[in-house]
């Protein structure tokens, strides 16, 4: 399917020739005008390839590559965190800090089977209480505080990245979510900052987790990217092959004008705005997840690192996301070359019927 270039991608297409500058401007304008429409792009891509193929008198078949790596299994994501024990004397000492009830719950049947998010909330509450103990604190408490503080990143990792909710969000087991994934991920980032400040809000954290578990974001996006790459790449190859053949003398021909009409109506007028809107939304949550990845990198499991590098990493040229963006740029550049070869002013294509 054909993808839309983002504003950055549009800017990257600017070439020395006037025709290239004009086409890049048209593409950039279509991106800026696009809203956050989440309409499925597949029908528009199919129509675009059909119209382009008819004009070129070839059958354009988009061949989608095999799926990349799935979200890692939970056992490969979990970080083992040893359970700290205190003796009776230490338990008595902590009553002076009003921590007896907190520790008693942790050792109760319910406390021993806490979910990872609840374990995180417990440890955050324990640290807040211990740090607030002041002059009543026993001498040994600071060492325990330091040890527990060192475990917070791993506890946070288990509660978020290794959670069932993140598995749902990262896969394709549920319907494509229409929620704002970037905002949810930013909530997790803010809660990590709050954790370090001693202001962690377990209720807000678990509310965000619940949103993650209601639908899938990454899996459906990856499926679309694979289809977009396949469609854009086959269209690009067809345009490059046709250029010199259609405009041998460097002037517009009837067929080149038909191609310009396909470009205006079915790419710029239909497919590109929808793809640009989707990629704008996806780019936002990819950046938010990349920020979380940077924050948690010291404790990240290798299984997640490998998955993130292959699928989403904005800094990895071969990630699925970056390859998709390159296909957008390469496809738009093929139209530039065609218009330059045929001596067509891209402005003349806008508004054609």
Image (cartoon, rainbow, N blue to C red):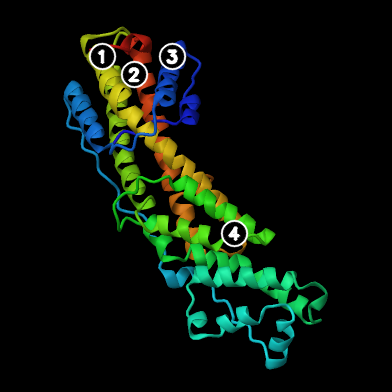
Q: Nearer the viewer, mark 4 or mark 1?
A: 4
The answer for how far apart the CA atoms under marks 3 and 4 are is: 43 Å
Q: Is residue 19 above or below residue 82?
A: above
Q: In 3D space, how far apart are the residues under numbered discs 2 and 3 (Cα atoms)?
A: 13 Å
Per the model, the C-alpha gap separating discs 2 and 1 is: 8 Å
Q: Nearer the viewer, residue 196 or 10?
A: 196
Q: Position of residue 16 (x, y in %)?
A: 51, 16
Q: Secondary structure at mark 1?
A: helix
Mark 4 and mark 2 lie on one chain; the one further toward the N terminus is: 4
Q: Residues within 10 Å of mark 2 (few under 14, many from 20)?
A: many
Mark 3–mark 4 CB contact (< 8 Å): no
Q: Which mark is residue 297?
A: 4
Q: CB atoms at circles 2 and 1 under 8 Å apart?
A: yes
- In the image, what residue occupies the spot 21% across and 9% down? 254
Q: Which mark is residue 256?
A: 1
The mark tally for this picture is 4
Q: For the residues marked 4 and 1, what is the alpha-carbon distance in whole angstroms?
A: 52 Å
**Residue 47 higher or lower than 66, as above or below:** above
Question: Do the numbered discs 4 and 1 sit on residues whose CB atoms are within 8 Å?
Answer: no
Q: Nearer the viewer, residue 283 or 247?
A: 283
| First of labels 3, 1 by sequence position | 3
Q: Identify the secondary structure beneath mark 2.
A: helix
């Amino acid at each position: 399917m054909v993808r839309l270039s983002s504003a950055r991608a549009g800017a990257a297409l600017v070439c020395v020739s006037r025709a290239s500058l004009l086409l890049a401007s048209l593409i950039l304008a279509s991106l800026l005008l696009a809203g956050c429409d989440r309409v499925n792009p597949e029908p528009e891509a199919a129509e675009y390839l059909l119209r382009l193929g008819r004009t070129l008198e070839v059958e354009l078949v988009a061949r989608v590559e095999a799926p990349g790596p799935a979200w890692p299994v939970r056992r490969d994501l979990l970080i083992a965190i040893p359970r700290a024990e205190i003796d009776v004397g230490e338990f008595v000492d902590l009553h002076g800090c009003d921590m007896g009830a907190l520790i008693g719950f942790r050792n109760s049947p319910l406390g021993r089977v806490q979910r990872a998010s609840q374990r995180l909330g417990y440890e955050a509450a324990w640290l807040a209480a211990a740090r607030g103990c002041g002059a009543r604190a026993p001498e040994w408490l600071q060492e325990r505080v330091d040890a527990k503080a060192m475990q917070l990143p791993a506890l946070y990792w288990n509660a978020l990245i290794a959670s069932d909710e993140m598995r749902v969000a990262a896969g394709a087991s549920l319907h494509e979510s229409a929620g704002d994934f970037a905002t949810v991920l930013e909530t997790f980032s803010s809660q990590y900052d709050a954790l370090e400040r001693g202001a962690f809000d377990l209720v807000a954290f678990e509310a965000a987790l619940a949103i993650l578990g209601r639908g899938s974001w990454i899996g459906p996006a990856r499926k679309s990217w694979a289809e977009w790459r396949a469609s854009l790449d086959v269209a690009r190859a067809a345009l490059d092959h046709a250029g010199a053949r259609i405009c041998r003398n460097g002037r517009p021909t009837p067929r080149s004008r038909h191609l310009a009409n396909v470009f205006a109506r079915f790419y710029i007028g239909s497919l590109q705005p929808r793809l640009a809107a989707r990629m704008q939304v996806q780019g936002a949550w990819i950046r938010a997840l990349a920020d979380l990845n940077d924050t948690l990198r010291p404790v990240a499991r290798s299984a997640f690192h490998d998955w993130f590098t292959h699928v989403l990493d904005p800094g990895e040229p071969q990630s699925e996301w970056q390859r998709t963006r390159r296909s957008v740029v390469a496809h738009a550049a093929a139209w530039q070359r065609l218009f330059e070869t045929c001596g067509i002013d891209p402005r003349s294509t806008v508004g054609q019927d």
